Amino acid sequence: MYRFCCLLDKVLNKLIISPIKKRAFKQCGHCVKIGKGFEAYGIENIIMGNDISINNNALFMCTRASVIIHDHVMFGPHVTVITGSHRTDIIGRYMTSIGNDEKLPENDQDIVFEGDNWIGTGATILKGVRIGKGAIVAAGAIVTSDVPEYSVVGGIPAKVIKMRFSEEELKQHKKMLENS
């Protein structure tokens, strides 16, 4: 019975839920896979390229800014992407009473994934961040600033751990991708 329920859940997600969510995006390319439990607040602000995989239980919060995902990006399970923050500078008011209409422009900023990225399990990407082409974000990292191209970042806050390739390997990698 348990196997049947799991199979039914997968079939429902693949045939009904995932296609409905894909139509709600501002733009959605080809070969986009969305795992079950994916939640998006502001789904109309998400732009997706081709060959994107969003694993189970990912959360995208982008009610006032955009999430732009270029081609060939993988998101592990439980990834969180948040384009905004709350105002904390209003004297004499509880933060819960401050609405979206009172936010400042700097409270919400786009997040861009430049392509060929791997975002590890449980990573959090915060407002205004640009994940450079070919970059990898380690599991559990909290990314608060831009990530250089072809780097591997991790930690809280995320810092560069290493580069994926040497300069010579990177030239070869880019050349091979151009020819494929």
Image: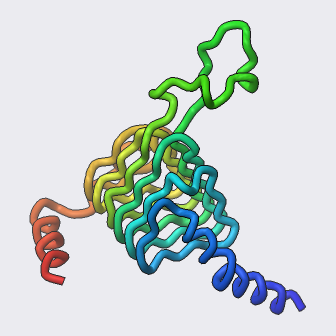
Vertically, is 12 above or below 24?
A: below
Q: Residue furthest top?
A: 92
Where residue 38 sits, quadrant-wise, is bottom right
Q: Say whether residue 68 is left or right of residue 123.
A: left
Identify whether 159 is placed above or below 43: above
Residue toward you, 163 or 2: 2
Pinpoint residue 67: horizontal percent, then vertical percent: 46, 52
Q: Please say if 49 is above or below 146.
A: below
Image quadrant where one finds the C terminus: bottom left
Report the coloring of the rendering.
rainbow
User: How many numbered discs?
Assistant: 0
22 vs 130: above or below: below
- Residue ID at (34%, 47%): 147
Figure quadrant of the N terminus? bottom right
Which residue is at a point 48% across and 42% down the rendered structure image? 65
Residue at point 75%, 26% (across, down) = 96
Q: Where is residue 79 in the image (x, y as percent from the top left)?
A: 57, 57
Q: Which residue lies furthest to the right in this view?
A: 1
Rendered image quadrant of residue 134? bottom left
Q: Residue at x 28, y 59 (%)?
A: 133
